[in-house]
């Protein structure tokens, strides 16, 4: 340290150093020889010949000297760093309160940001982290207004055969398979039914055995397991591959095991990861019957080097030629591709990730501003120390470096703790994030990328809040700072602190506006009237084997109804196919039978619900006209249906609904049209809380269209509905232990689930807004308290000269009011802009919601009043005798 | 003076001699050379072509440090002084030298 200091103080250019040193040496050697009596001329020659090439010697020395200097600079730099860090730590120890507040503030900001970065990273930055991810695409049917239409089997076969841009194309659909569970009751495993080339299309190789081949379709009863299922259920037993397992009560041959892969997850729908894959049977026929039912999703792998544009042009051309060949079914149908990653993530999740990242970004900014403010106050208090350093020869750069090192140490501490906070948030995330918001393709984890983000934030944050004190400290001359005795802040630091406090207020107001809008959305969604009774009801899905006849299914459902009704505690029960606010329902094509012949294409889609007679009564959905269903509406009886209010409004206008006849496709494989008479009109039910336009629906009797999947609704005689679960499950198992019971939820849980995503957003943004407000008020309080402390003497004089308490109060509050007003104005402006940006998340709330934009400033005023009151009162109570003597 | 002197120093020994010389106090390069030559009765001749590169190298290694002082001639001179790590190096070199000479003596001076 001493050495390096000297080398800086006595800095001489290296060439001159070497020259002087060697020349002196030669001179002294010559002098010695001359003193011994040698002739000066000869002495000089002898010395030079002894040395040899003097220039070469100097060059060698300069060369080594240069390396020496580089090394010394590095050691000096490291020395100074160590010195600065030690000093910074000592500074922190002398003011532990300040250090703790600063580090905790930063830890909160960085922690929240790192967790949100993990979400943004998984959804926005690298949604499909595999090589060549852009080669995997979904292929949709596109028709007017439907960008992602499901595909009919014949179109899929045509696309797969005729395309020139795909290596492989496959169709798949979501299903489930019943496997005997450990408790003896059947358990439903999420599954997919796929065409043979599915695994080629998503690029997944087996870890054991093989995937499907074309010849497998001859047998049909083959299955591929996921590695997770294979390990969990079969202990990773290699003999399972090639062996036989029972699915839905029938034997299937396991041909292979595939690893967990994000591409498989990306192709999955909903929140469930498929764990086994079966083959679907597709008729090779390509008649009109195969082009009516659109129920397949199609995924494909592009050939290497094929652009999305080329693939899009290819499938569009194929769709156009199919439309020319079979206009009756395909007129106006186009095909479109979409990157698999984009399909997997979905726009709502992308937007949510952006929203949360933006919100936590603002919180981090507020944290930085707060710490900067704290540091500014400390730097002002340390003005004398810094001036001493400066007058002892420390340059501005050196002092700046020391202050930045202190910031970096603070930020480093904050970052370290922040990483822990972020890790904790990500650990807790699965329990907090609503199911279904994150598709299986998105996994949140604290990995090296998140850690790198933490490090980067530490650096950025340290510079962001570290520059303020540097600017302040290096702006004033040492003489000025010392003469003021570290009492008075320099003018620009003074202004800077007010600007920072104003910015914090602006950020808090902006966050509050966003939080307010989202909260209002949540309240609006929760107060939506679903149109049904929300009493204690238990619901669950029960499936009959797909291959059973409608009669067999009907008997199966009847047996279950009898068994469940006999269970203790069970009151009424009903069958349905959809539930209010659940967001899922079947759709079918229909037309009104009015004697006109019509084009098969000219049919509208309508919601299609299959319900038992007691359904309307149990769920409290009023029958407005005509009658509901009775036990007499059996499959042999005349085919009847009910329609809802939206149906009447949209399709029947002034016509009398009762007695009209509809031709509507029934749920069947393949779908077949059934002519039904309208016997009643039911009240409107909300399928989703955020639904704006009422959906037209047709209700048909359970007995007249028994499908393989049905929803059982059970009311308890008394008490909570959830208590019925074990009894009802046992009753179903008594009828058939191979049939799994899935999606067991109460009706209340369904309506809570329906608003889970908006609630998640509102709670998260609201919490961050509250945090932002708290930080901003701490900032405002800090600035006011400090300014009052600095001006105590002035206030003392004013009071001594006759100023009233009120006048001093006005003086202090006036300063605070300006900061808050300017900050609030900027924040409200930002809030108005961001309100528009999150318009997609709002429901029945305008982006410029008057209530939000009045409550937020009012809330701010209230909290700001609290934050400034204490400093203001202290100013007003300044005792002139004390304050004037205090100097 | 011939390029290859019979008094050519064994590799590494020059460093040790310089360190030992500086242990007595700071000196400039010329003084180091004359001190070694006089003390060894000119059995060891320190050539400038070896001395100065050695000094710069040792400065780089942190064994010695330099400062500008004044020479006997009243001129600015670069004075070298031993650092703490230089002192440690001297101790190590001395130990090596002792082992080496003891070993060589056992053969050369054997009766």
Image: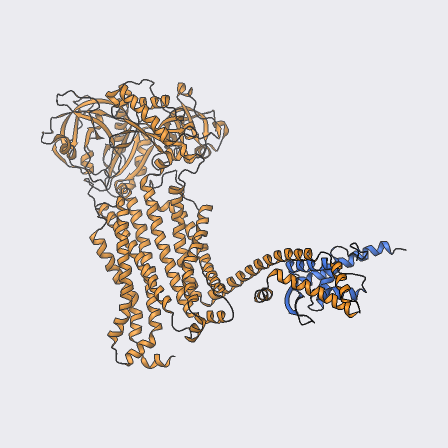
Chain colours: A orange, B blue
Q: Residue A508's x, y, as percent?
A: 31, 57
Q: Residue at x 23, y 53 (%)?
A: A852
Q: Quadrant of residue A538?
A: top left
**Which quarter of the rendering shows the N terminus of chain A?**
bottom right
Farthest residue toward the right? B111
Q: Quadrant of residue A300?
A: top left
Asked whether A247 or A515 is in front, the reply is: A515
Asked whether A373 or A188 is in front, the reply is: A373
Would you say residue A51 is visible in this rendering? yes
Asked whether A603 or A791 is in front, the reply is: A791
The number of numbered badges drawn on the structure is 0
Q: Is residue A591 left or right of residue A115?
A: left
Q: Is residue A106 left or right of residue A687?
A: right
Q: Quadrant of residue A212?
A: top left
Would you say residue A629 is visible in this rendering? no
**Which quarter of the rendering shows the C terminus of chain A?**
bottom left
Q: Residue A796's x, y, as percent?
A: 31, 78
Q: Is residue A381 left or right of residue A287?
A: right
Q: Residue at x 32, y 17 (%)?
A: A285
Q: Is residue A355 above or below residue A227?
A: below
Asked whether A864 or A251 is in front, the reply is: A864
Q: Is residue B110 above or below residue A192?
A: below
Q: Residue A729's x, y, as percent?
A: 32, 35
Q: Residue A539's x, y, as percent?
A: 27, 37
């Amino acid at each position: 340290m001493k050495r390096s200091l000297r080398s800086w103080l006595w800095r001489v250019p290296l060439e001159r150093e070497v020259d002087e040193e060697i020349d002196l040496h030669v001179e002294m050697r010559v002098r010695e020889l001359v003193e011994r009596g040698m002739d000066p001329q000869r002495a000089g020659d002898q010395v030079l010949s002894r040395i040899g090439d003097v220039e070469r010697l100097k060059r060698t020395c300069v060369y080594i000297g240069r390396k020496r200097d580089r090394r010394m600079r590095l050691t000096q730099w490291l020395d100074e760093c160590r010195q600065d860090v030690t000093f910074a730590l000592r500074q922190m120890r002398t003011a532990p309160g300040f250090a703790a507040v600063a580090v905790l503030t930063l830890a909160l900001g960085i922690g929240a940001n790192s967790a949100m970065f993990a979400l943004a990273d998984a959804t926005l930055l690298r949604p499909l982290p595999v090589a060549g991810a852009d080669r995997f695409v979904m292929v949709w049917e596109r028709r007017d207004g439907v960008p992602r239409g499901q595909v009919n089997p014949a179109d899929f076969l045509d696309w797969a055969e005729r395309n020139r841009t795909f290596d492989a194309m496959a169709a798949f659909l979501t299903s489930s398979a019943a496997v005997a569970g450990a408790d003896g009751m059947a358990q439903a495993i999420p599954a997919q039914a796929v065409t043979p080339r599915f695994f080629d299309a998503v690029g997944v190789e087996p870890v054991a055995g093989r995937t499907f081949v074309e010849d497998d379709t001859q047998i049909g009863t083959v299955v591929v397991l996921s590695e997770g299922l294979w390990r969990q259920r079969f202990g990773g037993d290699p003999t399972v591959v090639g062996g036989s397992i029972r699915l839905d009560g029938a034997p299937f041959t396991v041909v292979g095991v595939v690893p967990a892969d994000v591409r498989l997850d990306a192709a999955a729908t909903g929140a469930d990861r498929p764990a086994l894959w079966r083959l679907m049977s597709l008729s090779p026929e390509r008649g009109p019957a195969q082009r009516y039912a659109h129920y397949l999703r199609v995924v494909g792998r592009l050939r290497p080097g094929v652009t999305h544009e080329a693939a899009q042009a290819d499938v569009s051309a194929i769709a156009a030629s199919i439309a020319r060949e079979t206009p009756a079914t395909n007129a106006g149908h186009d095909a479109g591709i979409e990157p698999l990653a984009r399909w997997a993530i979905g726009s709502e999740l992308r937007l949510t990730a952006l929203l949360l990242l933006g919100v936590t970004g603002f919180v981090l900014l507020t944290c930085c501003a707060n710490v900067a403010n704290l540091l500014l106050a400390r730097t002002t208090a340390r003005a004398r120390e810094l001036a001493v350093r400066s007058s002892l020869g420390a340059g501005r750069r050196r002092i700046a470096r020391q202050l930045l090192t202190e910031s970096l140490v603070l930020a480093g501490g904050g970052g370290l703790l922040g990483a822990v906070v972020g890790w904790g948030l990500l650990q807790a995330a699965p329990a907090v994030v609503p199911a279904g918001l994150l598709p299986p393709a998105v996994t949140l984890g604290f990995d090296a990328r998140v850690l790198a983000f933490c490090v980067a934030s530490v650096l950025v944050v340290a510079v962001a809040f570290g520059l303020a004190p540097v600017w302040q400290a290096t702006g004033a001359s040492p003489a000025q700072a010392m003469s003021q005795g570290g009492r008075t802040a320099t003018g620009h630091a003074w202004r800077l602190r007010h600007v920072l406090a104003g910015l914090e207020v602006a950020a808090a107001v902006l966050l509050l506006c966003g939080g307010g809008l989202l909260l209002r959305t949540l309240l609006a969604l929760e107060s939506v009237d679903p149109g049904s009774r929300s009493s204690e009801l238990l619901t669950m899905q029960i499936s009959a084997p797909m291959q059973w006849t409608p009669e067999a299914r009907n008997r199966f459902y009847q047996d279950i109804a009898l068994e469940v009704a006999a269970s203790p505690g069970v009151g009424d029960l009903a069958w349905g196919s959809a539930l209010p606010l659940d967001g899922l329902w079947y759709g079918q094509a229909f037309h009104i039978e009015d004697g006109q012949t019509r084009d098969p294409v000219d049919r509208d889609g309508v919601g299609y619900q299959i319900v038992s007679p007691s359904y309307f009564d149990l769920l409290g959905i009023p029958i407005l006209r005509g009658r509901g269903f009775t036990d007499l509406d059996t499959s042999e009886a005349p085919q009847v249906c009910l329609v809802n209010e939206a149906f009447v409004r949209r399709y029947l206008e002034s016509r009398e609904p009762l007695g009209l006849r509809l031709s509507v496709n029934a749920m069947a494989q393949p779908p077949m049209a059934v002519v039904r008479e309208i016997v009643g009109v039911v009240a409107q039910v909300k399928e989703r809380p955020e639904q704006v336009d009422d959906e037209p629906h047709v209700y048909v009797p359970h007995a007249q269209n028994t499908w393989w999947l049905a929803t059982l609704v059970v009311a308890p005689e008394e008490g909570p509905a959830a208590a019925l679960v074990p009894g009802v499950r046992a009753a179903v198992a008594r009828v058939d232990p191979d049939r799994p019971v899935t999606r067991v939820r109460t009706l209340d849980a369904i309506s809570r689930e329906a608003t889970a995503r908006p609630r998640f957003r509102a709670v998260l943004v609201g919490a961050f807004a509250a945090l932002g407000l708290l930080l901003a008020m701490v900032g405002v309080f800090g600035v006011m308290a400090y300014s009052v402390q600095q001006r105590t003497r002035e206030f003392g004089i004013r009071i001594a000269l006759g100023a009233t308490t009120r006048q001093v109060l006005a003086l202090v509050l006036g300063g605070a009011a300006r900061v808050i007003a300017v900050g609030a104005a900027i924040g409200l402006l930002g809030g108005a802009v961001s309100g528009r940006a999150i318009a997609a998340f709002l429901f029945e709330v305008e982006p410029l919601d008057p209530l939000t934009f009045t409550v937020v400033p009012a809330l701010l005023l209230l909290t700001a009043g609290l934050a400034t009151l204490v400093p203001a009162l202290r100013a007003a109570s300044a005792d002139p005798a004390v304050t004037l003597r205090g100097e | 003076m011939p390029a290859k002197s019979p008094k050519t120093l064994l590799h590494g020994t020059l460093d040790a001699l310089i360190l030992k010389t500086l242990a007595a106090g700071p000196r400039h390069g010329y003084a180091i050379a004359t001190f070694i030559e006089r003390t060894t009765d000119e059995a060891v001749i320190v050539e400038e072509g070896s001395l100065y590169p050695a000094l710069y190298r040792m400065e780089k290694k942190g064994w010695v440090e330099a400062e500008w002082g004044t020479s006997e001639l009243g001129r600015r001179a670069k004075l070298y002084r031993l650092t703490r790590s230089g002192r440690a190096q001297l101790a190590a070199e001395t130990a090596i030298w002792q082992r080496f000479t003891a070993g060589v003596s056992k053969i050369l001076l054997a009766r």
